[in-house]
Image (cartoon, rainbow, N blue to C red):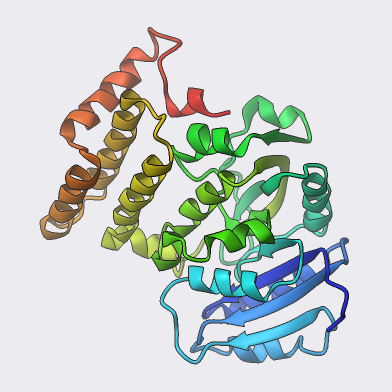
């Protein structure tokens, strides 16, 4: 290990992604930007992931292969472990089943270095399937924003206007963030979450500095049956954590209007009922929504009414209009 700290630490958290791991590591080692270290973390995989990792241990850029003896049950403690092990100014959480363009790091580092108070920056993502085929689906929805290379936003405003509605950082693999700011979240509730901790992580990071959007598709976000997000829909665990995230955000954003809060609660209500969960699963989630956020079916009706009125009132708040 070099005594000179690299500018970027690349953390690859893995659990049972042996089939995708070699292409992922290769896509990192092929980066045109070279001032990085690579930390490979395994969360007690039951496949041959560790064997794949050890094939790269002779590469000088691979500074750690860390294997858990027991599984944590969540990706986010592994994120924080990597952040604490990292030495770089910036950290890239490069999920083990995703891919990146060779100029991913060079582009994002340049954007990050041009904004001294940066908390995080992120590039556009394209969806790929288990075979690596690229989908034409637009998951970034930048519209006219993409006419320029990138844009910088005040983080607190970005949290209120963008991240309150949803996580616009659709995939951690598409983002680069400041390590010193992330270390301030070492006791954040996101660490105890399984499905939505990334949303709370990006929101919390935005409160600590500027956010930069890079309008290039440089990240490939893999979709397959083993994704944690798929399991969250079936169990209702994801929307349960949504409630937790919105509660945490509202506690940090006292300036939010009552109308905006009610719209957000209505969106949660809609998501819950459209999952068509078993009654014994749905009922306690709806009770949580009402108890913790005062969210009821009336908020859902307001959300539906808002969707009609927006055509008559161009100044009426909607998630799309609120977005910076």
Q: Position of residue 97 (x, y in %)?
A: 60, 69
- Above or below for 268 versus 161: below
Tell me the quadrant of the picture where the C terminus can be found: top right
- From what the image shows, is residue 118 above or below residue 35? above
The residue sitting at 27% across, 19% down in the picture is 305
Q: How many marks?
A: 0
The residue at 51%/86% (across/down) is 45
Q: Nearer the viewer, residue 70 or 312?
A: 70
Residue 171 placed where, x, y %?
A: 57, 55
Residue at the top extreme, as displayed: 312
Q: The N terminus is located in which quarter?
A: bottom right
Q: Is the residue 8 above or below the residue 207 in the image?
A: below
Q: Position of residue 195 (x, y in %)?
A: 41, 61
The location of residue 43, given as percent across then percent down, is 52, 82
Residue at 38% of width from left, 48% of height from top?
Answer: 248
Q: Is residue 161 left or right of residue 65?
A: left
Q: Is residue 222 visible?
A: no
Q: Is residue 279 visible?
A: yes
Side of 277 relative to 63 (left or right): left
Q: Residue 145 lies in what quarter of the image?
A: top right
Q: Quadrant of residue 143?
A: top right
Residue at the image position 17 percent from the left and 59 percent from the top: 281
């Amino acid at each position: 290990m070099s005594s000179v700290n690299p500018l970027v630490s690349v953390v690859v958290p893995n659990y049972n992604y042996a089939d995708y791991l070699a292409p992922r590591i290769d896509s990192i080692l092929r980066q045109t930007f070279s001032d990085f270290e690579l930390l490979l973390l395994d969360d007690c995989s039951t496949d041959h992931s560790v064997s794949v990792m050890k094939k790269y241990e002779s590469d000088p850029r691979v500074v750690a292969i860390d294997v858990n003896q027991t599984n944590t049950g969540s990706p986010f403690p592994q994120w924080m472990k990597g952040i604490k092990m990292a030495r770089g100014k910036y950290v890239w959480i490069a999920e083990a089943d995703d891919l990146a363009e060779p100029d991913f790091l060079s582009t994002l580092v340049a954007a990050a270095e041009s904004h001294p108070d940066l908390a995080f920056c992120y590039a556009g993502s394209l969806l790929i399937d288990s075979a690596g085929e690229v989908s034409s689906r637009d998951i970034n929805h930048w519209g006219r924003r993409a006419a320029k290379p990138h844009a910088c936003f005040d983080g607190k405003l970005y949290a209120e206007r963008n991240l309150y509605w949803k996580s616009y950082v659709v995939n951690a693999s598409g983002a680069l963030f400041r390590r010193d700011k992330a270390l301030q979240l070492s006791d954040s509730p996101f660490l105890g979450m399984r499905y939505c901790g990334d949303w709370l992580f990006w929101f919390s990071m935005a409160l600590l500095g500027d956010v930069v959007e890079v309008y290039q598709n440089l990240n490939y976000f893999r979709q397959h049956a083993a994704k944690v997000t798929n399991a969250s829909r079936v169990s209702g665990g994801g929307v349960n954590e949504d409630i937790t995230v919105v509660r945490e955000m509202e506690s940090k954003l006292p300036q939010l209007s009552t109308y905006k809060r009610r719209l957000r609660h209505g969106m949660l209500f809609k998501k819950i009922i459209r999952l068509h969960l078993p009654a014994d699963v749905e009922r306690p989630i709806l009770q949580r929504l009402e108890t913790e956020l005062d969210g009821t079916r009336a908020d859902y009706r307001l959300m539906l009414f808002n969707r009609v009125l927006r055509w008559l009132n161009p100044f009426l708040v909607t998630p799309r209009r609120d977005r910076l």
